Image (cartoon, rainbow, N blue to C red):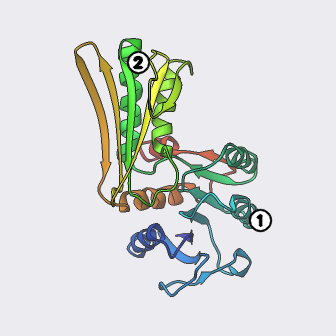
Amino acid sequence: MTNVLILGACGKMGGNVLSLLQGDKEAKAVCGVDLFPREIGIPVYENFSDVAEAVDVMIDFSSPQNLKERLEFAKRKHIGIVLASTGFTAEDIKLIDEYSASVAIFKTANLSLGVNLMQALCKAAAEVLGDAFDVEIVERHHNLKKDAPSGTALMLADTVNQVFEGQKRYVEGRSGMVGAREKSEIGIHAVRGGTIVGEHEVMFAGEDEIITISHSARSKRVFAAGAVRAAKFLSGKPAGKYEMKDLLNAENA
């Protein structure tokens, strides 16, 4: 049985994780940490120093703020951490790389199985279509999302750009007299409104034809389910960086 600590336990995503773990036979939520603790059926603490339960893995659906504190806690307790939030800065990524020498860290821009399949399809499309098709990415999220473009949109752009050996440059939105589109561009556009859970569309626009690969999340539970799968995968793993393809390879082995 994998003992899970939920960081951001009292938030919406924390609630989804807790709900899924309540019916899981291989993992259970033993406690949570949240800036605003309240009664949710498991002990919830305001500070890591108050955690007394035995923990195997921490699922983090909070925010990039205070990243070092949670990585240090994972290192001190010898537990893995699933980083399920987005919006990390270059400094954050550097910190994650440093701590991966002593902590098992699972990080991916999106925990949905469908999005990771979409990523593979975009790579295959870019390999076949090459420079004959322009690539534009549109992402849509709810009006409370703080970062733009989304981590998933950037992940998809990076996936396509890898096919072109990193030669593409990202253009985030266009306005005014920007001139004709250059072949070196990958356009990335962010839409915010209402309660949209998450939608991503990658368009390959060529001469007289358009190919679109898209994914739409109807509920945040898909991300919570992915986080639970990641936590069970990460439990007992040695220090290092892990991502969705590692989980999928292990499940399909």
What residue lies at 40% left-to-right and 14% top-to-bottom? 130
Q: Residue 230 appears at what percent x and percent y?
A: 50, 55
Q: Marks 1 and 2, how far apart in space?
A: 44 Å
Upstream in the sequence, badge 1 or badge 2? 1
Mark 2 Cα shell of 10 Å, populated few (<14), some (14-19), many (≥20): some
Question: Nearest the camera: 131 or 169?
Answer: 169
Position of residue 87 in the picture relative to residue 250 (left or right): right
SS class, disc 1: helix
Q: Residue 26 appears at what percent x and percent y?
A: 46, 67
Quarter-of-image position of residue 79 = bottom right
The residue furthest left is: 208
Q: Amino acid at mark 2?
A: Glu
- Relative to 221, does residue 18 appear above or below in the rendering? below
Quarter-of-image position of residue 59 = bottom right
Q: Residue 200 appears at what percent x and percent y?
A: 36, 42
What residue lies at 41% left-to-right and 13% top-to-bottom? 131
SS class, disc 2: helix
- Relative to 240, does residue 48 appear above or below in the rendering? below
Q: Residue 157 appears at what percent x and percent y?
A: 47, 32
Q: How many marks?
A: 2
**Residue at the disc numbered 1:** 76
Q: Amino acid at mark 1?
A: Arg
Query: Can you tell which of label 1 and label 2 is closer to the viewer?
Result: 2
Position of residue 11 in the picture relative to residue 117 (left or right): right
Mark 1 Cα shell of 10 Å, populated few (<14), some (14-19), many (≥20): few
- Relative to 207, does residue 144 appear above or below in the rendering? below
What residue lies at 74% left-to-right and 77% top-to-bottom? 49
What residue lies at 65% left-to-right and 76% top-to-bottom? 54
Q: Give the numbered dot on residue 127.
A: 2
Q: Quadrant of the C terminus?
A: top left
